[in-house]
Image: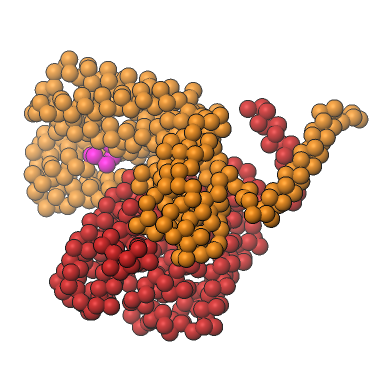
Amino acid sequence: MTSPSKGIYLAIAGAAVLAVAGGAAFWYATQRNAGTQTAADQLVTVNATTCEPNAITVPGGRRSFEIVNASDRPIEWEILNGVMVVAERENIAPGFRSTLEVQLAPGEYAITCGLLSNPRGTLTVTPSDEAAAAASEVTLRKFLGPLSEYRVYLVMQGNAAVKAAEALRDAITANDLEAAREAWHQARLPYRRIEPLAYRFSDLEERIDARAAYLAGREQDPAFIGYHRIEYGLFAENRTEGLAPFADALVADLTELAARLKQAPLDPGLLIEIPGESALQIAQGQIPQGENLYAGNDLQDLAASLEGIGKLAGLLRQVVAGVDPALDKVIEQDMQAAEAHLAAIAAEAHPTYGDVPKAARDALAADLTRLSESLRKLQPAIGMN
Amino acid sequence: MVGHYLKTTALALALGGWATGAMAADPSLDLVEPLAEYKLYVAENTAKLVEDTTAFTDAVKAGDVEKAKSLFAPTRTSYEKIEPIAELFSDLDVSIDARADDYEQAEQDPDFTGFHRIEYGLWEQGSTEGLAEYADKLLADVKELDARINGLTFPPEVVVGGAAVLMEEVAATKISGEEDRYSRTDLWDFDANFEGAEKIYELLRPLIADDEADFTAKVDGNFAAVDEVLEKYRSADGGFVSYEELTDTDRNALSAKVNTLAEDLATLRGKLGLG
C-alpha cells in the first residue's frame, strides 16, 4: 500500500484556500450589489436623450456593463461594431437595470442610447494583456463557427452539384448538344468547389471524376464513366447519343456524395489540412497537364477550385487572425495573387486550355504552390494537437 | 498553459459537486451539426422572406389594400422566426422592423420605415397612398439581409442563446400586444418567435438529453403548454385570430410559461460550454 503523494495534499489544501477565497468574493459581490453602486465594470445610465456617460473607455477583455433605464420608455442597449451588433440587452423597462457581460477586443465601438433618433455614444476598448491573451488563445470554441459554416457550404454546394447534373441529364435526354455542352461546363463548378473534401470518398471519386488516362482501355474502358465520359461524348464525339445512362449514374453518385458530405465529421485538423493539400494538388496536376481534355475549359474549373479553397482559407483566417496576424495577412495576399493571376490568364481569351502558354501555367502553378505553403503554416499556428 | 490547467483543476475541485452542470466544460464538436442545421434553417427562411416580401410589396404598390393586409402577417413570420440572427445587423433591423415608439416623432418621424410603417398605412390610414417608397425600401432591405446572412459565419453563442432571446422577445413585445398594434396580428409573430426558439432547442436537445433529463422534460412540457394555448387561437386559414380575442386568463398563462421558458433556455449556453 502506498500513501497518497504530497501533491494530493497540496491540491486539497489549495482547493480549500480557493473555496474560501471564492466565498469571500461572493460575499463581497453581494455587498456591492446591495448598494447603489454597481458591481459591473461600467455603469451606464440611459435618460431621455443620451447615455451617461456618453463616451466610455474600458480595457479589452471580458467586461460587464450595468445599464440603468432612467427614461420613460422601454429601451434596448447595444454595442455596435459598424452595423453589426456585438452584444445587446433588449426591453429594459423604465426604472429597471440590466447587466451585460461581453468579451471585447480592442477597437472603437458605438453604443445606442434609447430612441433611434438619439445620438449614439462611443465605447473605446484599449489593448490589454487580457484581450491579447484571449485573441491569441487557440480554442475549440473558435473553430465551431468556421466548422459549421463549412458544413453548410458542403451541403449547399453538394445540392447544387446534384441540381446541375440533373440539368445536364435533361439536356442530354432532349438531344440538345449545345445546351448539354453549356450544362456540362456549369455542372463541374459546384463539384470543384467542394473537391477538397469530396475527393476523399475514393469509391465515389472513381465514378464521378474518372479520367481515361488512368484506365487501361482509356476512353473505351468500361470504368470510364462520370463527368469526363460525358465530356468525351459531348466535346470529342460531338453527340448526345448514348450519354443518358452516364448522366443518370452521375446524378445518382452526386446524390450519394451530397448525403455523405452532409454527414462527414469535421474537425479543426481536417479543416486546416484540406485547403493547402488541395492547392498543391492543383499546382502539380491540373495546372501543368489540364484535366478537361475534351472541353478544354480548365480555367473555369480552376476558378471554381480557387473559390472552394478561398472559402476554407477565409474560415481559417477567422481563427488565425488573432493568433498570428502576420500569417493571416500572408494567406490573404497569396490568395489574392492566385485569383488575380488566374483572372488575367482567363482575360486573354485562349480558345482552349491547351493554348495557354507554358510560362503562364508555370507562373500560376508557382502561385498555388506558394499559397499551399502558407496554408501549411496554419497547422503549427492554430492546430489543436 | 500548465498553470492554467492547474488553476482550472483546483477550481473544479473546490467547486466540486454543487457546481457541475452550472459550469459545463469546453464546448464540444457535437455542436457543429446543430449549428450548421440552424444556418440552413435560417437560409430557407430568408429565401422565403424575400419571396413573400416581393408579393406583399407588389400588392402595396398595386394599391390593393385588402390583399396587402392579408399578406402582412404571413410575410413577417419568416423574419420573426430568425430574429436572433436578423437583428445582428442593426441598420437593417431598424429599417425593417422598428416600431414608431423608437422615434421621437413616432409615426410622423421621417425615419420610421419598414413593416410597421406599412402596417400603419394599411390599417390606420386604410390606404396604400405614399407607401410605395417604403415598399421598395423594405424589399431592398430584405434582399440585403438575405445576402448578408448567407455570407455570415454564425457566432455559436448567438445561435445557442437565440432560443432564450426569442422567448424574451415574446414576453416583452408580443404578450403585451405592442408589436403589431395597428393590425392586431401579434399572435402570428408570437407563434413565429416561438417556433424559432423551439427549432434551436430541438436541434440542441440531443446534446443534453442524456445528462439533463429533468431539464428537457420541463422545457418540453412548457413548449407543449404554450403550443396548446396558441392552438386555441388558430383561424380557419391556418393563421391566427386578432390579438384582442386573447383572454386575460390565457394571456397570464402564456406569460408565465414564456417567462419560465426564457429563463430555462437562457441556461443552454452554460450547459453547452458557451457561457
Residue in view at x 25 percent, y 50 percent: A163
Between B112 and A383, the residue placed more toward the observer is B112
Residue A120 percent across, percent down from the top left = 39, 49
Q: Name chain A's colour.
A: orange
Q: Quadrant of residue A270?
A: top left
Relative placement, left or right, of A345 versus B187 is left
Residue A195 percent across, percent down from the top left = 32, 36
Residue in view at x 45 percent, y 47 percent: A54
Let me know if residue B193 appears in the view: yes
Residue B66 percent across, percent down from the top left = 22, 79
Which segment did they paint magenta?
A188-192
Between B258 and A291, the residue placed more toward the observer is B258
Residue A287 percent across, percent down from the top left = 23, 23
Q: Main secondary structure of the magenta part?
A: helix
From this view, report whether residue A106 is shown above or below residue B237: above
Between A315 and A198, the residue placed more toward the observer is A315
Between B86 and B153, the residue placed more toward the observer is B86
Relative placement, left or right, of B152 versus A25 is left
Let me know if residue B160 appears in the view: no
